Amino acid sequence: DLWTDNHMGYPHGRLRRALDRWLERRWLGAADAVTVVTEGQREILDARGLARRVEVVSNGFLRSPEEVRLDAAAPRLPREAFRIVFTGRIYAHPGHTAAPFLDALVRLRADAEAAFARVRADFYGRVDDAFHAGVAERGLGGTVRFHGLVAPERALEEQRAADALLALVPAGRREVALTKTYDYVGALRPVLVVGPPDGASAAVVREAGSGAAFAPDDVAGMARWLRARAEGPPEPPEARTGRVERGLRWCYAALAGEHAAVLSSGAPRPSR
């Protein structure tokens, strides 16, 4: 994440911000190279003239290529519920909210009651008070389930066991590619991104062939996406197999080579 341009906002006062900006200019300006994970972050640093050389090396996921390929080949049995899973944290920030997704569930309930009845939305991690209030106000207590904090290993297991995965991008932050977006790609499950359709998280999911992105106000689009998957059969192994090689572009083993190229090169590399 960026420092004083953090996507969740800067939490301190003007004096602290001025000091941090001075430190930011000093440290980044003294570096031979600075790496960021998206083009949008590079644009922000370039616009501020903070570093002599800014390179983009994407974030990624820990699973090995062998694990991903084995998972892709495993069959998934039909079951009564369609589970969409969120892992991570919803911050107490006006732009980071599950409200658009909850509204999509309400829309699905109105448009296709049978499909809605099959949906279960499981949230693992941390949420804010607005999340619980939003679930109660919309009458979604039987559909949306909050499980609290779990170990990272359990979170990854829940991702792989899900029928689909949910990513919530802070409103308007095109430069943000959530860490969980890469974990989701590595889990080989369809991903619903709620956030800027032209943003970095959406681009990762599109390039991986792993799902779709909807602007927060496109409630009808999200409801249609959920309905199609809740009413349809489980995704066949060949559909996941087709995404494997694209997804492996973000495994850490592949990205290590990109970091090595930055460390060993004295000249900037061209953008992709």
Image (cartoon, rainbow, N blue to C red):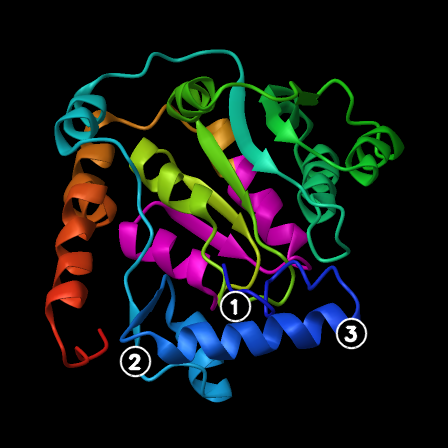
Q: In this picture, which residue range is highlighted in magenta?
A: 198-227
Q: In front: 100, or 128?
A: 128
Q: Nearer the viewer, mark 2 or mark 3?
A: 3
Amino acid on which disc 1 is placed: Arg
Between discs 1 and 2, the one toward the N terminus: 2
Q: Position of residue 107 (x, y in %)?
A: 72, 42
Residue drawn at the location 51% of the way across and 11% of the way down: 80
Q: Position of residue 35 (x, y in %)?
A: 33, 66
Residue at the disc numbered 3: 14
Between discs 1 and 3, the one toward the N terminus: 3
The residues bearing labels 1 and 2 have C-alpha atoms spaced at a distance of: 22 Å
Q: Position of residue 129 (x, y in %)?
A: 83, 36
> What is the secondary structure assignment of the residue under circle 2?
loop
Between discs 2 and 3, the one toward the N terminus: 3
Residue at the disc numbered 2: 53
Label 1 CA crowd tier, 10 Å (few <14, some 14–19, many 20+): many
**Vertical relation: 33 (above or below) 69:** below
Q: Quadrant of the C terminus?
A: bottom left
The residues bearing labels 1 and 3 have C-alpha atoms spaced at a distance of: 25 Å
Label 3 CA crowd tier, 10 Å (few <14, some 14–19, many 20+): few
- For the residues bearing labels 1 and 2, Cβ distance under 8 angstroms: no
> What is the secondary structure assignment of the residue under circle 3?
helix
> What is the secondary structure assignment of the residue under circle 1?
loop
Residue at the disc numbered 1: 174
Residue drawn at the location 39% of the way across and 13% of the way down: 78
Answer yes or no: is residue 160 visible: yes
Amino acid on which disc 3 is placed: Arg
